[in-house]
Amino acid sequence: MNNEALQNRESLEARMSSWDRELSNLKDQNSQLEIRHQEALDRCKALEENASLREREISDIKAENSELRITNVEALKKCRSMHEELDTHDREVSELKAENSKLEGMYGEALRTRESLEARMSSRDRELSSLKEQNSRLEIRQREAPERYRVLEEKMGLQERQLSDLKAENAELLSRIRSSEPSL
């Protein structure tokens, strides 16, 4: 009888040792999951901050685009005005041959001004094109950000469920250990 009790005791001690190891492993896993959870939260926060920064950049670029559009319209008006002035000069040149040298000087100046305006317009067009491309890239990034955030939330939810399951398992193991203690 004494031998049987000793064997039962050794069997129970072996089981408790096994449970202790399993509980320790579960605690380690819980710690790792908590670290991963915090990292996921940190990454999520960084993504939110990045999205906010991108939104500000997009807003700034839109403001610049608006200013460039106004400048472009003004340049076009000036260019049209210069064309009208040149047409007037051409008529005056054909009608007033006596003032030919004076009008040719004005015409040359108008051409240089027009070329300068055209060069500025060309530069502005390149800037505008570059900003549009940049806007397109930023809009793509902005559209992708919610999907990345959703994926992170899903991963975090899965980790939370796994963590909850492990906690429930731990509680059940603790309950079993406690309920088996009085029988010793």
Image (spheres, rainbow, N blue to C red):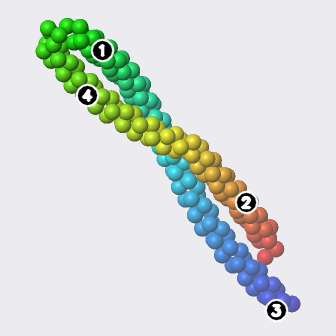
Picture quarter containing residue 134? top left
Q: Secondary structure at mark 3?
A: helix
Give the residue drawn at x 41%, y 29%.
65
155 relative to 95 in the view: left or right = right
Q: Secondary structure at mark 2?
A: helix
Residue sitting farthest toward the right: 1
Q: Which mark is residue 115?
A: 4
The type of residue carrying mark 1 is Asp
Q: In front of the other: label 4 or label 3?
A: 4
Q: CA distance from mark 1 to mark 4?
A: 16 Å
- 86 relative to 55, above or below: above
Picture quarter containing residue 109? top left
Q: In front of the other: label 2 or label 1?
A: 1
Q: Position of residue 8 (x, y in %)?
A: 81, 84
Q: Which mark is residue 130?
A: none
127 relative to 102 in the view: left or right = right
- 80 relative to 92, above or below: below
134 relative to 184 in the view: left or right = left
Q: Which mark is residue 3?
A: 3
Q: CA distance from mark 4 to mark 3?
A: 111 Å
Among the two numbered marks 1 and 4 on one chain, the one whose residue lies closer to the N terminus: 1
- For label 1, the residue is 87
State yes or no: discs 2 and 3 in contact (Cβ < 8 Å): no
The type of residue carrying mark 3 is Asn
Q: Residues within 10 Å of mark 2 (few under 14, many from 20)?
A: few
The type of residue carrying mark 4 is Glu
